[in-house]
Structures are given as structure tokens and as C-alpha cells.
């Protein structure tokens, strides 16, 4: 594999698919998962990232995470790049990563360690041990503001580190890190905080962004991506204003609403998302009303062709 | 079981044992784990909490966590109460909790969900589903300031919820919660932020505190507990000043040093702790120097009798 070429392919929307759970049992609704993947691919998504936070990775057992990987690689069937989220202890992450490779996934995204105590050298060891143990390339999901960016600088020379999903909304810090790490290391810099922050991160050197919005309104995410790529600022800010109420609704309750807003919006327009698992419950009446209004305002009426 | 009586037994030091890892392979050093448990019991600890954060729960695989539970219950052998930390997804937490019960553990401590998105109703469902599925009583480890204390108020009537390890250092908030929840629910209120914060939490209604210090200097932890119980404030503040430099060293790097300070201190006095796993690395030279000085200042010279 040419890692540099691969990194360039990641510089687009990194779509995080929701995981459909059945309303009654909260079991995974595999038909729903499949329909959602078809929806993403049919709408032009090039990079799909199962086992992300918006996929409710931490509400699944390890066995469920593995089964999701296996099935989503099958469903995608080469039509997009599949980057699988992995995490937990080093040993568990390597186990999940090897399984992803065995299933035919293209790369992994290593979550920030869930361990409450992290030192700089310890974080370097954590990521490095995982990256070097896997046969497929890795992205790092960098989201803890207390961990130094020098961790990324130390790891950047690793050939198999191909990207960073940067999720600390500190633009000067991000800009400095992108500038300081040599271009020859071929890191794909991805804004990890979606459409709301993408314009600022692109301005500071990002070349792609993550998205949960793609699960419901991929046209808007792609419109934003295209506008950012050609620096059409008029369109950028138009789309940004359109999607802001949605992203702000997701951000409520310290992001508690992150996934449930997407899922309930999907159900409103006839997409199959089901419910969220604990520790996230259904929207309250006020937020339900707000998402209903927004769907109406967006004019989202999906025809059967788009859904299938 | 009389849950009220059991809750009263938790109102003491909840000692979180470190997990000894071998220096070369970072495998669990079972001899070290056993020696540490003996040390805690011989020094008068009444409540032992394996799979806490200071035990590096999140740096272990699920299989290792289960094996640790099994062995520590055996090592303790009825000489103290064993409360086992459990967490991850609801299904995984229930699996870990049932395993703990099967091993003969007395109770579980449910970690705050690691899921990055938490809603109030979702948190209630998370804890309730786990508490009700287990045959042994539960404590909640409450540490996310963004989650409302009304979650605790909702859950307090559950008979099998016997305690809260409260780890948000907001004393007025804690006081109000303790006051608002009826005494008849028999909740053991435990300060979850150890010796440094215990005096303030006791003043606000706590009746016990967690401790990592017990792994190295249990006499001091017990001196503090006894002084707090009889409201001997002179001794309270004396001990508090003595342990503060240790706790402050543990708090460095956004608590990155939490466990490694204990482990390196233990090694310095001849206790068997080994190394920390990723994402925590060894102390830097400055911190190593500081812990060496403190051990000297404390006059910690352990005789063979205390160690065995």
C-alpha cells in the first residue's frame, strides 16, 4: 500500500454511521444498519467509520463491535473506504484492530484512551504499540485537550499513521501542530468536530471533516465539503447557517443529545435508526419539537428511490 | 442481607488496590497483587475495591479484570468487604457484575459510563438496569459534573443501591444532594477524591473516603479516618498537611500521575507494585526526585514483618 496516496483518500467527509437498535429489545437491527450504509454510499460518501462515538461504540459489547465491523465491510463491499474505530486497553485495541484487518477493513481509527489517567509518554506508547501491531494503517482520534500535541509530533513519522481526527476546538493549537509536523509524514488532518467547526479547521489546514449529519442529510455535508475545497465562502457560510441549529441541538446537555437527535431525525423522514442505548435516552418534548421543525424547514421528504 | 447494615459497613476507607504489573512484560504480577492485598488487610483495611481507576481497570482486558476479581476475593478470604468495579456497556457491566457475585464479592461499584454522550434519563436507565440485574448490592461512582445529581435522587430508593462514591469536588452541590435524599434510603456517602478532599466531604456529610494512599501509607489514611470520625480537627489538619504533597504529585498532568506515583513510592519502600501500563509511563526525573524526598520525609522504612 502507498500510505501517502491512502492518506489523500481520507481527505474528505469521514461519515460516522449510526448503529440502528430495535425499539423493543435494543438489539442491533442489522437490516437498519445495512439500509443506512446503502443510504450513505448511494449519496456519495467515500469514507465510512463504524465504531465511532456516533455509532455508540461504547454502548456495545466487544462481540457486537466485531460483528458490526464484519457486516459493514461486507455491506460496503469496496464501494468506500472503511475505517474501524478501536479502543479500550492496548491489548483489546490490538485484538479489535486485527479483527478489522481480517474482515477486510482499510484502516482503523484509534479512540483516545478511556483510561482516566494519561501521561504524555504513556499516550505515545499507547498509540505506537497499537499502530505497530496492526497490518493496516491507523488514524488517531485526538480529543483530550490535556494531552500534549507533541504526542502527535512524536508519532507522525510512523509510516502506518496516516491521519489525525483532531477534535480539540482550539484553532491556534491545531494550526501550529499542522504547521510544525513535516508534510513528508503524509498525515491526513481531519476536523473531528463536524460541520459546525469544519470551516475553521479547513482555514487552519484540515482537508476533511467527520460527520454524523450524513446519516440524515448527506447532500448538505457534501455541499459544504465541495465549497470548502474550492474556497467558495459564500456557500460555506450559507450551509453552515443551515446546519448550525441541528449541530447545536446535538450539542445540548454536554453533547448528551449527539446521537439521539440524528436517530430521531432519521425516523422522522422514514430512515431506519431505532433508539439509542443507555446512557442516552429519547429526546424530551421540547427537543423533539425542535427537530421536527428543523426537518420541516429543511424540506426533507425522502422518496423511496433515495431510501433504497 | 440487611442492606442498611451493609451500607454502614462501607462508611470507612474504601481502599483501591493497585494492580502490580511486571516490569518486562507488563503482565499481571499475581504474587505482587497478593502481597499488596495482605499488606492492606494486615494494616486494618475493611473495604477493598479492585477494578477501580487506581487499579488501572481500563488498562486491563475484560478477562484480566475477571481474573483479578476471582483472585482478590480468594486472597481477601472474608477478612474485608470486597467491592468490585464494573463498567463499559450495560451488557458488559452486568456480565462483570454477575461474575463478581459468582466469585463471592460483596458488592459492585459501577463506574460512570465511558460513553461520551450521557443524558439524565439515559444515566438513570444505565445504572438502574445494572443494579437491578445483579444479585449483590451496588455503589455508584459519580464523577461527571455534567450529569445531574437528580440521577442519584431517582435511584436512591432502590434497595440494592447502598452507596455513592461522590467524586465531583463541588461541596455545596454534594451537601445539597446528601440533605435532599431521605436518610431512609440508607446511602453510604463516600468521598471519591481521597484524603485531599475527605475533610471537606466529611464536613458536608460523607462518612467514608476512597484511598490510593493506603497502598503505601495506610497508617496515615487510618489516622485521618479516625480523626474525622471523632471530629478531632487538629489531627485532621495535621494529617492533611502531611499527605497533601503526595496527593498533589498524583494530581499532576491532569491526574496522569495518579497511579504511577503510588507504584514508584511502593517500589521505593520495598513493596511490590511494578510498572504502570499505557497510557501511563514512568515518572520523569523531577517527579521521581520529589517522591523520593517525600518517602524520606515520611520516614517510611518498612520492616519485613509489616511487608509479609
Image (spheres, coloured by chain):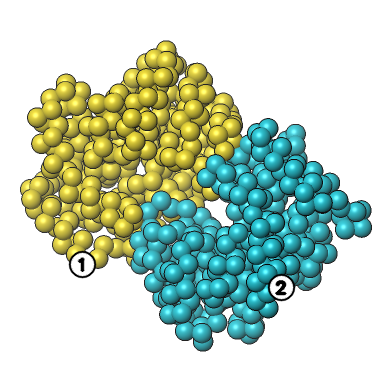
Chain colours: A yellow, B cyan
Query: Nearest the camera: A5 or B151?
Result: B151
Query: Nearest the camera: A176 or A300?
Result: A176
x and y, in percent, of residue B90 in the image: 48, 61
Rendered residue at 20%/49% (across/down): A246
Badge 1: residue crowd in 10 Å (few <14, some 14–19, many ≥20): few
- The span from disc 1 to disc 2 (Cα, nearest Å) is 50 Å
- Quarter containing the C terminus of chain B: bottom right
Assess whether mark 2 and mark 1 are in contact (beta carbons under 8 angstroms).
Answer: no
The residue lying furthest to the front in this view is B234
In this rendering, the answer to whether B99 lies above or below A49 is below
x and y, in percent, of residue A190 in the image: 34, 30
Marker disc for residue B226: 2
In this rendering, the answer to whether A208 lies above or below B82 is above
Q: Can residue A146 be seen in this view?
A: yes
What residue is disc 1 on? Answer: A285
Badge 2: residue crowd in 10 Å (few <14, some 14–19, many ≥20): some
Amino acid at each position: 500500500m502507498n500510505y501517502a496516496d491512502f492518506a489523500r483518500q481520507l481527505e474528505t467527509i469521514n461519515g460516522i454511521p449510526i448503529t440502528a437498535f430495535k425499539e423493543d429489545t435494543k438489539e442491533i437491527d442489522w437490516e437498519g444498519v445495512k439500509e443506512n450504509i446503502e443510504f450513505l454510499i448511494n449519496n456519495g460518501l467515500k469514507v465510512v467509520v463504524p465504531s465511532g462515538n456516533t455509532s455508540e461504540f461504547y454502548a456495545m459489547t466487544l462481540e457486537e463491535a466485531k460483528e458490526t465491523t464484519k457486516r459493514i465491510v461486507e455491506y460496503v463491499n469496496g464501494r468506500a473506504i472503511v475505517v474501524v474505530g478501536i479502543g479500550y486497553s492496548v491489548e483489546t485495541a490490538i485484538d479489535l484492530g486485527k479483527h478489522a484487518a481480517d474482515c477486510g477493513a482499510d484502516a482503523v481509527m484509534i479512540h483516545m484512551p478511556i483510561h482516566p489517567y494519561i501521561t504524555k509518554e504513556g499516550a505515545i506508547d499507547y498509540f505506537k504499540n497499537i499502530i505497530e501491531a496492526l497490518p493496516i494503517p491507523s488514524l488517531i482520534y485526538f480529543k483530550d485537550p490535556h494531552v500534549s500535541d507533541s504526542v502527535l509530533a512524536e508519532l507522525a513519522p510512523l509510516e502506518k499513521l496516516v491521519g489525525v481526527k483532531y477534535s480539540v476546538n482550539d484553532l491556534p493549537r491545531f494550526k501550529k501542530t499542522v504547521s510544525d509536523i513535516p508534510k513528508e509524514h503524509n498525515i491526513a488532518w481531519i476536523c473531528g468536530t463536524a460541520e459546525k467547526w469544519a470551516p475553521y479547521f479547513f482555514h487552519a489546514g484540515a482537508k476533511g471533516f467527520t460527520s454524523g449529519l450524513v446519516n440524515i442529510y448527506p447532500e448538505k455535508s457534501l455541499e459544504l465539503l465541495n465549497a470548502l475545497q474550492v474556497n467558495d465562502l459564500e456557500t460555506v457560510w450559507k450551509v453552515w447557517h443551515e446546519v448550525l441549529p441541528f449541530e447545536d441541538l446535538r450539542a445540548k446537555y454536554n453533547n448528551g443529545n449527539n446521537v439521539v437527535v440524528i436517530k430521531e431525525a432519521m425516523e422522522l423522514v422514514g430512515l431506519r435508526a431505532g433508539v439509542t442505548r443507555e446512557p442516552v435516552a429519547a429526546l424530551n418534548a421540547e427537543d423533539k419539537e425542535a427537530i421536527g421543525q428543523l426537518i420541516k424547514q429543511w424540506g426533507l421528504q425522502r422518496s423511496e428511490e433515495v431510501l433504497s
